[in-house]
Image: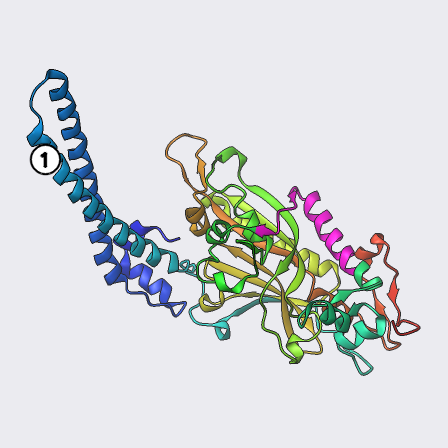
Amino acid sequence: MLDVTLIRNRPDQVRDALRKRAVDPDIPGFLTLDTAFREARTAVERLRGERRRISAEIAVRRREGAEADALQATAKALTGELADAEARLAELAGRHQEFLDALPNLPDDDVAAGGKENNEVVRAVGAPPAFGFPARDHVELTEDLGLVDHRRGAALAGSGYWIYRGEGAALEWALLNHFLDAHRRAGYEFVLPPHLLTYEAGYTAGQFPKFADEVFRVDGHFLLPTAETALVNLHRGETLDERDLPRRYVAYTPCYRRESGSHRTADRGTLRGHQFNKVELFQFARPGGSDAAHLELLARAEELVAGLGLHYRVTKLAAGDISPAQAKTYDVEVWLPSLGGYAEVSSVSNAREYQARRGGIRYRPAGGGRSAYVHTLNASGLATSRLLPAILEQHQRADGTVAVPEVLRRWGLPEVLRPRATSA
């Protein structure tokens, strides 16, 4: 949520920043509403104070045996006036909050305006593999190697689901173990959160109310679309000590999303589905330390991708391509030969104080003084459903085998994945 004081004092700055996202809310209209809201709140407070004063005077007169009929009539009239004022305040407060809830975060000054066409490639690491043979795509490779069963996954759950099998399941689990082990050794606390969350959790994350219809719902809860939604709520409503910041967490969860896939090459196989696995990194940081924390998270994601021997690039997203809750995002994208392009495996984002305001998450300065909002940051560390295709496509060999990255072999995988002998 944006700071309403910033909107009041610097409306042009807010409007210009939001226009970078192609969002143009009625700021003048809101300021008129805000004035009416504050006047209504003052009126309610005045009437409540007057009612308390009269009630106290009536009590005194009764104790003294004095007549209080006139005061009681005044109190009755005041009660009706207060009820009307409270109803007006409630109506204005609802409209006021609805406007604020709908506003996305302000993109950082160095974030380009516009949509994904204005995304900036920061760097590319390594080079795309050159094959001296007809390269195959990840769908063919998973079928020949017996790693993923798309047909039976669809039979169990419908389109957009799959089953990892045999060495495919082992490879998926090795990736998750490798990521979690690396982050734990770096000092991140391991968390296994619930997968079913309340509306308030989605609101704090900045995903609700705008995306409330894009999640799977179960008995008044929703299935988390990413562990970020749970992790940002770990300290909801709390005031942390500055000495304890940054707080660093790592979580593993499946992610459940209403993705709209198709038969296009960019959506085939495990590239896009309703359920996939992800390791998520999250930090609660001091405002003065959040830029450094952002770069640290990016470095962690890059280190993992580079350790798998994959060619990748880092892209800084333009304002219109950043999720509404975030102020700045870098994507780490792996090369997929079958696409002739890149697929994102990690989004590394800084929400500044936007999520903390929605969740009431503050910190107490070590030197004393008023509490302030923390900054929240998150990064995929990493998502696996696009990594497996990248590993298969980039490390495939002419004989139909695929080399397994060395860092994964300690989790019981062979050096080479070979085509299955018989059909399953």
Residue located 86% across and 54% down the image: 412
In the image, residue 346 sits, relative to residue 201, either above or below, namely below
- Horizontal placement of 194 versus 319: left or right? right
Instruction: Count residues near mark 1 (Cα–Cα under 10 Å), then give few for <14, some for 14-19, many for 20+.
Output: few
Residue 298 shows in this picture: no
102 in magenta: no
Q: In terms of depth relative to the viewer, which is nearer, 141 or 187?
A: 141
The image quadrant of residue 45 is top left
In the image, residue 341 sits, relative to residue 90, either above or below, namely below
Residue located 62% across and 54% down the image: 299
On the rendered image, what quadrant is the C terminus found in?
bottom right
The image quadrant of residue 298 is bottom right
Q: Amino acid at mark 1?
A: Ala
Q: Which residues are magenta?
A: 171-196
| Mark 1, residue position | 73
Residue with the most extreme bottom position: 134
Residue with the most extreme top position: 64
- Horizontal placement of 183 versus 350: left or right? right
- State how many labels appear: 1
Q: In terms of depth relative to the viewer, which is nearer, 287 or 213?
A: 213
Image coordinates for residue 295, horizontal then vertical, percent: 56, 53
Residue located 85% across and 58% down the image: 413
Q: In terms of depth relative to the viewer, which is nearer, 295 or 340?
A: 340
- Horizontal placement of 93 versus 371: left or right? left
Image coordinates for residue 362, horizontal then vertical, percent: 44, 40
In the image, residue 280 sits, relative to residue 159, either above or below, namely above
Image coordinates for residue 296, horizontal then vertical, percent: 59, 50
Helix, strand or loop at disc 1?
Answer: helix
Residue 259 shows in this picture: yes
